[in-house]
Each structure stands twice: as C-alpha cells, then as structure tokens.
Image (cartoon, rainbow, N blue to C red):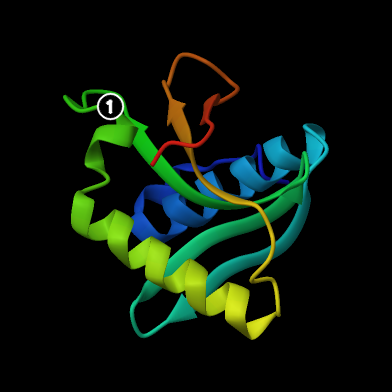
Amino acid sequence: QCLKRTKKMAKTKEVGRWAECIAAHFLNIKGFKILSRNFNTRFGEIDIVAQGDGVIAFVEVRFRGKGSYLLPEETITYKKQQRIKTAASIYMNSFDLTDANVRFDVICVSKDKWFMLPNVRHIVDAF
C-alpha cells in the first residue's frame, strides 16, 4: 500500500506520510522492529524509532522530489538535529531505555516521475 502514490498526494503532509511509510517498510526489510512512528514532544517530533542491530535508531525521514537543488540530508539543520536529540532523550526516559545504545539515522526518499519505485538511501549514524 505504501508504494501506491497518486496525483492527489501533492500535499506536503500526505507526501511526508508516504515517505515515512516507505522508510518504515525499508527498515522492516533490513530487520528492524518499528517501535514508534511520529513520536511527538513539545520540543519536536521523531519520525521513526526502530530497534535492530543492537541499537535504538531515531530516524529522520526526508523526501525530495525532482528539481530540488539540495540533497534531502542537507535540509536537516543543526537546530533540527538538537530538537530530535531532545525528543529522543524524552523517548528514552519515557520507556526506560536510558542504557540502550542509540544512533541518529536519516532515510532519504526520492521519486522521479519516470520511475515506478522510489529511491531510498539510509544514512546510518548521520549526526
């Protein structure tokens, strides 16, 4: 169902949800268990929290369509990174995971209208 993307998905939130669905599916294929999606705090949101390879991965999902001048990972500012880290700390304290090994990953999803499937890049330990 994630792979179906219609012309109606032009709205930013819908495209973001689609990209997050693709990223979650990608992580499942790689053997990760999705612990949470769209974990919200007053400091920010974590798109995906996944467990695998002996770590808890806090994953930021970025989508860029055709014609974008920046790479998806280049759009994550220092301020955004700090908000994600603060939200991750809240998540870890909330679920008693303070002793867990953690990392911050980025999954970049891009789509060209000429190709059926999206391109997915996983940047491990991105920041």
Looking at the image, which residue is at 44% across and 72% down? 87
Q: Quadrant of residue 94?
A: bottom right
Instruction: Specify few, some or many for label 1: CA neighbours under 10 Å numbering under 14, 14-19, or 20 or more.
Output: some
Residue type, label 1:
Leu
Of 45 and 116, the residue lying toward us? 45
Q: Position of residue 13 (x, y in %)?
A: 40, 61
Residue at mark 1: 71
Task: State whether residue 127 is above or below residue 112.
Answer: below
Q: Position of residue 4 (x, y in %)?
A: 64, 40
Q: Position of residue 64 (x, y in %)?
A: 33, 34
Q: Quadrant of residue 63?
A: top left
Of 30 and 115, the residue lying toward us? 30
Task: State whether residue 93 is above or below residue 127.
Answer: below
Task: State whether residue 41 is above or below residue 2.
Answer: below
Of 85 and 21, the residue lying toward us? 85
Looking at the image, which residue is at 77% across and 32% down? 30
Q: Among all residues in the image, which is located at the extreme front? A: 99
Of 52 and 40, the residue lying toward us? 52
Looking at the image, which residue is at 36% across and 49% down? 10
Mark 1 secondary-structure assignment: loop
Q: Among all residues in the image, which is located at the extreme left? A: 69
Q: Among all residues in the image, which is located at the extreme top? A: 114
- The quadrant of the picture occupied by the C terminus is top left
Instruction: Specify whether 127 is left or right of 22.
Output: left
Q: Quadrant of residue 42?
A: bottom left
Looking at the image, which residue is at 42% across and 36% down? 126
Instruction: Specify whether 48 is left or right of 10.
Output: right
Task: State whether residue 92 is above or below residue 25.
Answer: below
Q: Position of residue 90 (x, y in %)?
A: 51, 79
